[in-house]
Amino acid sequence: MLAENGHPKAALDACDRALSVIASKFPDAPEPPEALLLLRNALSAQLGSIQISTTLQQGVLTLTWRVIPGASYRLESSTDLRAWTLRETNFVESSGSASWTTSPSAQTEFFRLVVE
């Protein structure tokens, strides 16, 4: 794993800080170090791939996903894919996964999970 102490989000944050330091100390450099960019891209890809499973039973929708250690999540919903409403930010991990349950208020409702 390309992670700082098993925490990909912390490692990604460290890469971003390093890139900022390099940019401020060497403003005339043609580009940041390639190895650091490759590491940042790999960490970003690791964080960006979240699969959500869904169940709908008796009008109750449950979303479940694997938790990335050290990452925070923001769950949003939309009825038109243009305007998004924050639904939840505090998730409790249980055995490496988190879930969220709701009774959908609209006939069509979309959900997205954002890693912060």
Image: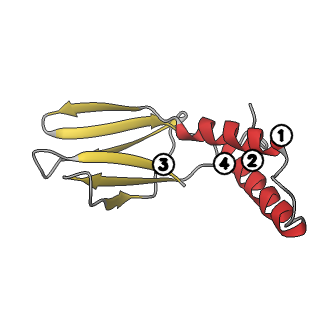
Q: CA distance from mark 1 to mark 2?
A: 14 Å
10 Å neighbourhood of mark 4: few (<14), some, or many (≥20)?
Answer: many
Is 69 on the left-hand or right-hand side of 15? left
For residue 92, the mark is 3
- Which residue is tagged 1? 35
Three-letter amino acid code at the position of disc 2: Ala
Q: CA distance from mark 1 to mark 4?
A: 18 Å
Classify mark 3: helix, strand or loop: loop
Three-letter amino acid code at the position of disc 3: Val
- Which residue is tagged 2? 11
The residue positioned farthest toward the right in the image shown = 25
Q: Are marks 4 and 2 in contact (CB under 8 Å)?
A: yes
Classify mark 1: helix, strand or loop: helix
- Which residue is tagged 4? 9
10 Å neighbourhood of mark 3: few (<14), some, or many (≥20)?
Answer: few
Total marks shown come to 4
